Amino acid sequence: MSSPKAKSLAWQYFKICEDDCSKAECGICATKISRGKCKSSYTTSSMLKHLSTCHQVFEKPDGSKRVNVESTAAAECSSRQPTIVEALSKRKLYDNSHPVSRCLTSKIGEMIALDFMPYSMVENVGFLRLVKELNARYTIPSRKYFSNTVVPGIYDKVTNKIKELLKSAVGPICATTDEWTSLQNDSFMSITSNFLIWNKGDLHRVTPVLSCSELVGSQTAELLLSEIRRQESEWGVSFATITSDNASNVIKALKDGEIFNIRCMAHTLNLIVHDAIRSNIDVKDIVADARSIIAHYNRSSRDARALRECQKRLNAPEHKLQQDVSTRWNSTYYALERMVEQREVINDMSFRGIGNTLSPNQWRMASSLIRVLKLFDIATKEVCTEEATIASILPVKENLLKRLEAFIGDSDIYGLDNFLNSLKSGIERRFSVPGNGPQPRDAYLQNQASYNRCLLATILDPRLKLSWCSTINRQEIERLLVTEVKKFATDSVELYEGTELYQSSSSEEAEDSVVFGAPENAGLVREQVDMDADIVTAVRQYLAAPTLKRHKSPLVFWPQYRNECQAMFALAVSLLSCPPTSVNSERLFSTAGVVTSPLRNRLKPKNVEILKFLHVNLKKLNFDYNTLA
């Protein structure tokens, strides 16, 4: 964004930030300075103060004109030979407190966390030569200074910024969690938050990492629960739901702590596919034979080279065969898809006595198999996006069952009827609707409360509502929705009046929200009969209205709809902040292997936690971690 056309000296050195017009960025040291709280009160005073304090840029004593002392001195020196003192001052090294030195040191600290660089990088000859060439007056600090001061300092600032965001959250704070063991055999537990905030009148989803803490001792349910409670206390929050994998110790910890648990949807889909493959001999044999063929070319460099030459000769895509990994979601699908793509090449190699191949029937079944598995790959990707919520769980179940049923009668799907039936039965068992009897141990929806939460979230997603299931009882859904909306209307009173409330992160203003349990205000409570009638009318109008297009966001719809029924808006916000998978925590640990690489094998667990925390959160905050204070 271009700077205003003004005579102020500030605009010679500052430009307005593109992502936040209330701040301006210094062109000398890249520091972001606030212009004021609102547009009518924007001023350049803070920018001028920054220039005079940090860069020796002053006004003339008479105030008639503003000048840059350094540039004026330079202009005078250009017409005469500089003195020895002036010449030496230009070559004088910056001290650590100089703004340029502080800025460069901070950027190097960010780079260490972002790019998984070892602290020893700052002592490497090549890096030192590069820094000296870029700025000869800057002296790079030692590796210990970065590990003990710079990076922990950035960590503290980012932590305070996230605490500000948590205080301004709209609705409940949800979380995901996972466990991981490093190369040094240290165990860690991650907790990633998921909540909504107001930003310039719109709702936005925020998913910062809260912790990646070392676990000392056996990973019992008691230890995991104590760590969750410690993180809640440290961040000043109480998790409404936690999404996790199916590990028994995690499930028991959440149950003992009376924390609502959502099972990871992606894990469950992956288990359904693996169970179906294991139970079908023909499919199991195809997967085993494919693994053997792929492993052969991955082991033999000579045959791998011959494979590449064959690909060139046959004008086939020059892709490497992919080995599937049982712990990696949908890797069997990717392995078979690549095999089918390279079918002609693999057959040609086998004909020349190099490696094995599949039989004609197996190739035909493999082609059909990748069409079926592609459904689960698409479903997994959809529920693993940062925008996904528990609203997608029931529609994914219903649509997978419909697609599988259509495949059973499809003549192009060869030899997979038993496999398709196994997939269907696995989906029906794991996603069975809770009834009077106990649920299966591996059921995704363990009780009626879990089912109702997912059902209400789906209905309150304006892109879905009731469109995903033709057999659902509309009257029962309407009664359930009305009942839940009434709870929000009677438990709260002032429901999001005005927008100033959401643009502030102060705890005093945030307490006025119904989601945070605001105190009752009798002057705002309407007569119960009228309130009930209005709620029923609002629910019916919402359900009767057309659904949103797929690419639209519920977070855009509900702020616009809140005046129709603010209690229903509050209910939607409370449900649409819950993620359906623990993928945010999974992704954190997928990068952790790089953090604790052989180049960094002496990192202490606390430093591992700091680096993983910053690697994710710096990007999520768009590198803006200056707090309001």
Image: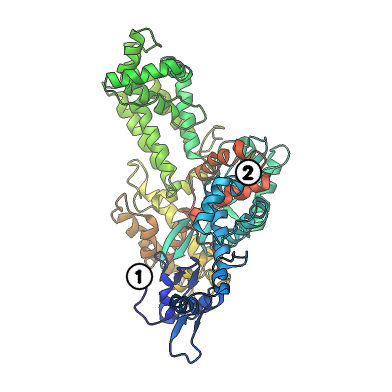
Q: Position of residue 585 (x, y in %)?
A: 54, 44
Q: Residue furthest front?
A: 81
> In the figure, residue 105 lies in which quadrant?
bottom right
User: In the visual, does 221 lie left or right of 522?
Assistant: right
Q: Nearer the viewer, residue 426 or 416?
A: 416
Q: Residue at x 43, y 61 (%)?
A: 203
Q: Nearer the viewer, residue 60 or 381?
A: 60
Q: Can residue 533 be seen?
A: no
Q: Secondary structure at mark 2?
A: strand
Residue 494's spot in the image, x, y percent?
49, 71
405 left or right, relative to 581? left
What's the CA distance linking mark 1 and mark 2? 45 Å
The residue to which callout 1 is attached is 2
Instruction: Kindly identify the amino acid type of the residue bearing the numbered disc 1.
Output: Ser
> Which residue is at the front of the view, 341 or 177?
341
Q: Specify the quadrant of the image occupied by residue 99.
A: bottom right
**Residues tagged 1 and 2 counted as in contact (Cβ below 8 A):** no
Q: Which mark is residue 189?
A: 2
Q: How many marks?
A: 2
- What residue type is disc 2 on? Met
Residue 255 at what x, y percent from top left?
Answer: 63, 44
Color scheme of the displayed model = rainbow
Q: Is residue 544 visible?
A: yes
User: For mark 2, does the 10 Å Cα neighbourhood hold few (<14), some (14 to 19), or many (20 or more) residues?
Assistant: many
| Helix, strand or loop under label 1 | loop
Q: Nearer the viewer, mark 1 or mark 2?
A: 1
